[in-house]
């Protein structure tokens, strides 16, 4: 079922070009796997949920972050990569396959079949570069650390790029101006909202939280 675009997309503070790009993201997110292998994509779906559980932020809405990431893997990307990693699509295939190899090596099971706490431990060790050597894995522990950083960035950035997430989180950075003029913002505080911004509450990190 197609998603309903959030109301802020109809604002005259958003240009037609920006609106079109955001609506395209919504359409892409409702698409299907195009580039990753089926096994790697299945693993990525679980990794996305492990890295960024969505229910506390979006309620019953669940964005297909794996589809959004898959969509980018055959494109030009951001123009750079780590020298120790291959190009994007190959790196994601090898990284996700290696995640399964390390899961088998450490727990005797595929990544998606692990308990949540074991998946979390594996992801933490991969990011920290503290995985044990695994001869069957295409990526070394050091390469897993590099890829894991890229992977986490891609998951979070895909989520924040989606109009529904922006609406739910009160993000209005796209509302800088319409086609006739660049209205911009006049408020100088994150806590102060402009009259044209969505009413949804902004969520900030609790500075008193340890």
Image (cartoon, helix red, strand yellow):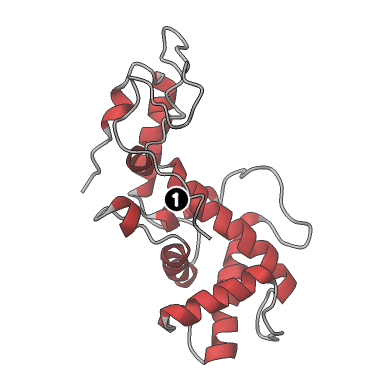
The answer to whether residue 140 is seen in the rendering is: no
Q: Residue at x 47, y 16 (%)?
A: 186
Residue, far left:
1
Q: Position of residue 83 (x, y in %)?
A: 79, 57
Which one is nearer the viewer's eye here, 156 or 191? 191
Dot 1 falls on a residue whose secondary structure is: helix
Residue, far right:
83
Which one is nearer the viewer's eye here, 210 or 100? 210
- Quadrant of res 97: bottom right
Q: Residue at x 45, y 12 (%)?
A: 183
Q: Position of residue 146 (x, y in %)?
A: 69, 63
Q: Residue beneath label 1, please?
A: 68
Q: Position of residue 109 (x, y in %)?
A: 48, 88
The answer to whether residue 152 is seen in the rendering is: yes
Q: Position of residue 158 (x, y in %)?
A: 47, 48
Q: Is residue 145 above or below residue 180?
A: below
Q: Tell me how many marks there are.
A: 1
Q: Residues within 10 Å of mark 1 (few under 14, many from 20)?
A: many
Q: Residue at x 54, y 83 (%)?
A: 103
């Amino acid at each position: 079922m197609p998603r309903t675009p959030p109301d802020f997309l109809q604002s005259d503070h958003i240009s037609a070009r920006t609106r079109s790009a955001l609506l395209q993201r919504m359409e892409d997110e409702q698409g299907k796997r195009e580039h990753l292998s089926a096994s790697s994509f299945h693993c990525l779906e679980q990794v996305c949920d492990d890295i960024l559980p969505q229910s506390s932020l979006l309620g019953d809405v669940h964005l297909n972050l794996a589809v959004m990431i898959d969509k980018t893997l055959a494109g030009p990307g951001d123009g750079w990569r780590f020298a120790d990693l291959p190009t994007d699509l190959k790196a994601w295939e090898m990284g996700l396959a290696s995640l399964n190899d390390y899961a088998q090596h450490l727990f005797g099971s595929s990544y998606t079949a692990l308990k949540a706490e074991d998946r979390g431990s594996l992801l933490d060790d991969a990011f920290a570069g503290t995985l044990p050597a695994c001869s069957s894995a295409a990526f070394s522990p050091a390469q897993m650390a590099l890829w894991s950083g890229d992977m986490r960035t891609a998951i979070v950035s895909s989520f924040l790029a989606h109009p529904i997430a922006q609406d739910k989180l009160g993000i209005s950075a796209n509302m800088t101006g319409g086609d006739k003029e660049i209205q911009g913002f006049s408020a100088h505080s994150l806590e102060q909202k402009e009259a044209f911004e969505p009413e949804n509450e902004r969520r900030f990190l609790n500075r008193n939280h340890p």
